[in-house]
Structures are given as C-alpha cells and as structure tokens.
Amino acid sequence: MPAETLVAARDITKVYNTGHINVQALRGVSVDIHEGDFMNIVGPSGSGKTTLLNLIGALDVATSGELSVLDKDISALSKRQRADLRLHSIGFVFQAYNLVPVLTARENVEFVLELQGVGAERRRRAHAILDQLGLGDLADRRPNELSGGQQQRVAVARAVASRPRLVLADEPTANLDGENAEILLRMMRALNEEHGTTFIFSTHDPRVVAHARRVVTLVDGRVAKDEEREPLRPVNHRGITQED
C-alpha cells in the first residue's frame, strides 16, 4: 500500500519584497513528501531551501501555487489555524537550538506538551524520549550545563515528544562536530524507522545527506533533481547501526 502523502506542493512560488526590489525565492516548485520519508532538501545558498521548509512548516505562505500539508490548504488557514497546525502536528529542530535557558532539559521538552494540554503524562513522556536519546541522566540540567551536542538532542526530544507526524530540521548539525553530528543523525533515523516519523532537512551538510533516503536538490528556486537512495544500515533505538 503506497505511503500517505503528507505534503503536496504544486507550482509554488515565493516572492519577497525588499524595498523597491522583489526577490523570487521559489520559482514553480512541485514536490510530494510521503509518510516515513527521511528526506533532505539541498542546494547552494539562496536556492530556496529554508524558504520551502518555512512554507511546509506553516511559518509563511506561498505567493502563488497550491500547498497542502497534512490535508490542510495552508493558504486558506488563518494565522491562528496555522499556529494550531504547528503546535499539534509539526515538530521543529533549529540550528540555534532555541531552548529556554531557565528551564531544565526535561522542562524544555515538557513545555510543548503543556501547550498542547497534556496533563500528568507529560513528565513520563518527556523522560521517555530523553532516555531514548541518551539524556535520561541529564534531564535536570539547564542548557548552559549541557554540551552543544546534548543541547541539540534536547531540541530533537522537544520536537518529537508531542508525536508530530512531520519534523522539520533547518541545518540541525551546523554547530556540531563530526561525532556529535553522527550521533544525532543516527538517533533521528532510529525515530524515523521505529515510529514512522517523517523528517525533512534543509542542509548544506554532506553528513546529513549521507543518511538520506531521498534528496531533493534546489537550484535558483527550482527543483533540479529528486532522487531516491538506498537505505543505510538499520539502526537500533539508541541510534547504533547493526555493525557497530
């Protein structure tokens, strides 16, 4: 049975007005993203990667074209409805982590669950995902007491704790060394393979591309290539490949 289409973009354009100049970031992008994809959007700077990710994440609306995300026509939604879609169905992993500095790792993960109205269960769910990402013993530390790699794993935990169908990650490994980037990517692959969570990355990083099962290349705001790849070795719940 074919995987469900979570994102359907048809001839999407995005134009930014900067004073007297119009900048066309996307020029007729069409792409389908399916449930369970582990997909990278790649391309040179200015190719439209982050713009496309922002549109899929309902952070912005297209200038023209049709974009459906989780069966919702994004252009037809109010700002409040787009915020509700993001809160309940889409997880975000940012390059800068965006953790709340005065909250512990557990409290950062719980924060989104609290906004969703999750009650007493939210502490158990936060601990469970932190433990799965190897941070169970660090749950009571604040961000400034964690390494960069640990902070990014907390950001991933926060993104997936609410059990979204779609996780968007904008340059998630940009501030990480090779070892921490590999740990993080294997853990996200484990979440994808074990729970079916769909991941979409916007990245320049070849380390991220190496883990992708699908790569969409943007050039000058257009899709230049959309290719499927052979899956990498399977990983277990700790993100360790079977040969490790």
Image: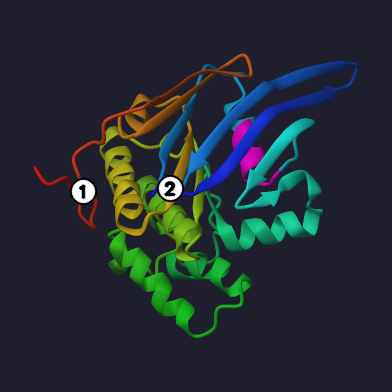
Say above or below: 185 vs 150: above
Residues shaded magenta: 52-59
What residue is rendered at 91% in x and 16% in y? 20
Res 138 visible: no
Q: Quadrant of the C terminus?
A: top left
What amino acid type should be assigned to the residue bearing mark 1?
A: Val
Say above or below: 179 vs 12: below
Say above or below: 11 vs 144: above
Closer to the camera in the image, 10 or 214 = 10
What residue is rendered at 29% in x and 63% in y? 132
What amino acid type should be assigned to the residue bearing mark 2?
A: Ala
Magenta stretch holds residue 56: yes
Closer to the camera in the image, 230 or 55 = 230
Image position, residue 30 (x, y; %): 61, 28
* Residue projecting furthest to the front: 1
Taking 174 as reference, is 223 left or right?
A: right
Q: Residues within 10 Å of mark 2 (few under 14, many from 20)?
A: few
Give the residue pinned by disc 2: 3
Image position, residue 5 (x, y; %): 52, 45
Give the residue pinned by disc 1: 235
